Image (cartoon, helix red, strand yellow):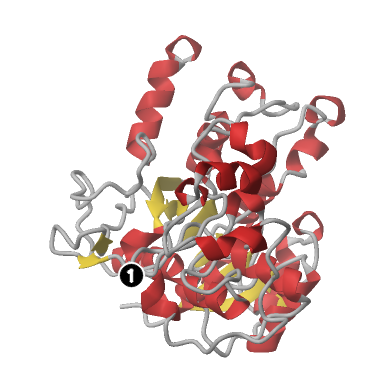
Amino acid sequence: MKKSYNAISLFSGAMGLDLGIEKAGFDIKVCCEMNKHAAQTIRNNTNIPVIEADINNISTQKILEEAKLKREEVDLVVGGPPCQAFSSAGMRRGLSDFRGNVIIQYLRVVSEIQPRYFILENVRGLLSAKLNAIPEGYEEYSKFIDTKGSVLYFLSQEFKKLGYTISFALFNSANYGVPQIRERMIVFGNKGNERIPLPQPTHSENGSFSTEKWVTLGDVISDLEEPKEGEFAPLRGKIANYIGLLKEGQNWTSLPKDIAKDAMGKAYELGGGKTGFMRRLSNQKPSPTLVTSPTMPATLLCHPTKNRALSIKEYARIQQFPDNWIFEGKLADIYKQIGNAVPVGLGYMAGKQIIAFDEGKVDLHSDVRPLIPYSRYKGTTDKEFNQQFQNINLTLF
């Protein structure tokens, strides 16, 4: 039985994903992060070597040297590359532009290091992202240009060529003990012919199917002291004038019509649910998805009972960072680091599943009929996606 697992982290950010990976049993040997504030946050809290540079300029040799590992010693490559658009500029600049996309850089590092496993985290948009340009060397994908889901199909095929079997789903973080309804793509890769089954939810909204109930916002922030000035962002414009009229869990729709019109301004006539406007959160539910600023009008994250936005300490609790985690930068930089992070619990779920799989403790067919949907959206697992992609694009195969 393997007693230690070595991991290399790409696009590390403030280390939310990595903290979960470490909690599961992996040893992060090096972090790659180009944002100066996030890189310093890693240094503030760990002794892990940090390569502070653009992934396009980081060689795998440099990564291995900093990690003090040989290729065969790397058990896991983990990271969440931003889901960049595949720009039409690729048609003009060819292969160099295509490879400049950070997701392709993630693929490059995996192909050159050949870890035993990989975890790729991303936003829901990866499911529908389109290949907009195909340079020389990738002509086999030309027929899929501007096809919904073609980026994920491309990645699946390229990982397969490298000898990996992948599985993936859009996971709701709340189903894994995170006090936040945050849905993220997790792609598992195994160097071999066996597919890593998707981890079953441990929590559910009502505690059904022998799971625990969702962890709520109140569960994790109620014991915090009231933040001092400078530890939370001030409310913007009209929001400060009207938020005091709303109770816990309410939004602009609970205001009298004449007041709502004045409070919302031009946004009042816009379509859509607009549920994030003038929004007070509820202590009785998980938080909505944290964004990079809690005071954006359409995604307001106001404290359930106080007339202020969520503080950075509350943000950190929701993302499950340790209370002693020292974030670098100004207030806006810190909100951005925490808002962009992967909840620690989601990283723990992913890392724990790989170790259980490696140790032969997972039923390979355990996810055939999940008792609880992984996400509120349909067609978001690898089996569903692959079948739908082929059915929709049948004439292209």
Q: Is residue 252 left or right of residue 285?
A: right
Q: Is residue 165 left or right of residue 372?
A: right
Q: Which quarter of the figure has residue 220?
A: bottom left
Looking at the image, the residue that sits furthest to the right is 93
Q: Position of residue 279 (x, y in %)?
A: 52, 56
Vertically, is 151 above or below 367? above
Residue 81 in sight: yes
Front residue of 389/242: it is: 242
Residue 25 in sight: no
Q: Position of residue 232 (x, y in %)?
A: 66, 75
Q: Is residue 41 left or right of residue 369?
A: right
Count of numbered circles on the image: 1
Give me the residue at 69% from left, 71% from top. Answer: 233
Q: Which quarter of the figure has residue 74?
A: bottom right
Give me the residue at 80% from left, 25% from top. Answer: 91
Quarter of the image that includes the N terminus: bottom left
Vertically, is 47 above or below 153? below
* Dot 1 crowding, Cα within 10 Å, few <14, some 14–19, many 20+: many
Vertically, is 185 above or below 20? above
Vertically, is 357 above or below 45? above
Q: Specify the amino acid type for callout 1.
A: Val
Residue at mark 1? 215
